[in-house]
Image (cartoon, rainbow, N blue to C red):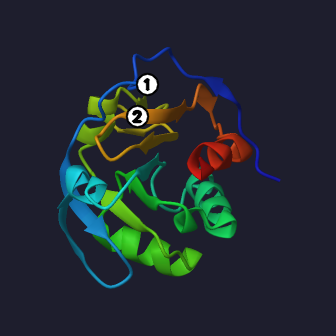
Amino acid sequence: MVDFDVVDLPETDHVDVGDTAPDFTRPLVNEEYWEDVALSDLLEDGPVLLVFHPMDGAFPATYIWNEIRDRNWGDHLQVVGLSISSPYEHKTFIAAREMDYQLFSDPANEVAESYGIVNDLDGMAGIEEPRPAIFRIDEDGTVDFAWVASEWPDFPDYDAVEEAISN
């Protein structure tokens, strides 16, 4: 059994429903390679579900991506992840989880900062990652679904996300 304390995260002024999602360009990784891609480029092909997750290998990232994989959310729209993990770590994570999803690499955590979802890692001075969060972004860049973790660890209501992406 995993032994950990649940910690309330501080309030955050994060991107929310009705806001324009901040655009960014980062390495987008699949199981074979990566290349710099802008979020706006992905939106040209339709809505995007942007999933911020802890670094690859952390148990919350594993649980989140196993659930997304098992629910086949990619059948409804483009699903991409984002964390501080390197492209090399992402390739390993994608293979280990047998995922058909791509992951953005943002080691400096600048995208999480622009979305207002930075999580300072407890006990690690100067180390941060995104707090778990999910944003559904429509073709024009407007957020029409937002969930942001309020405690650590925290997981989305997967049924609520599924309902939002099915509409």
Position above or below: 155 against 166: above
Residue at x 27%, y 40% (from the top left corner): 111
Residue 130 point in image, percent of width and height: 41, 39
> Furthest residue to the front?
167
Residue 106 point in image, percent of width and height: 27, 51
Tags 1 and 2 touching, CB below 8 Å: yes
Quadrant of residue 127 within the rendered picture = top left
Question: In this rendering, would 113 be left or right of 103?
Answer: left
Amino acid type for the residue under numbered disc 1: Asp
Using a 10 Å C-alpha cutoff, classify the residue at mark 1 as few (fewer than 14 neighbours), some (14 to 19) or many (20 or more): some
> Furthest residue to the bottom?
32
Residue 156 point in image, percent of width and height: 65, 40
Assign a secondary structure to mark 2: strand
Residue at x 27%, y 51% (from the top left corner): 107
Assign a secondary structure to mark 1: loop
The label shown at residue 106 is none
Question: In this rendering, would 148 be left or right of 162?
Answer: left
Using a 10 Å C-alpha cutoff, classify the residue at mark 2 as few (fewer than 14 neighbours), some (14 to 19) or many (20 or more): many
Label 2 sits on residue: 143
Q: How far apart are the two marked residues, 1 and 2, measured between alpha carbons?
A: 7 Å
Closer mark to the observer between disc 1 and disc 2: 2
Q: Earlier in the sequence, mark 1 or mark 2?
A: 1
Residue at x 35%, y 31% (from the top left corner): 125
Amino acid type for the residue under numbered disc 2: Val
Label 1 sits on residue: 16
Residue 67 point in image, percent of width and height: 67, 60
Quadrant of residue 119 within the rendered picture = top left
Quadrant of residue 98 within the rendered picture = bottom right
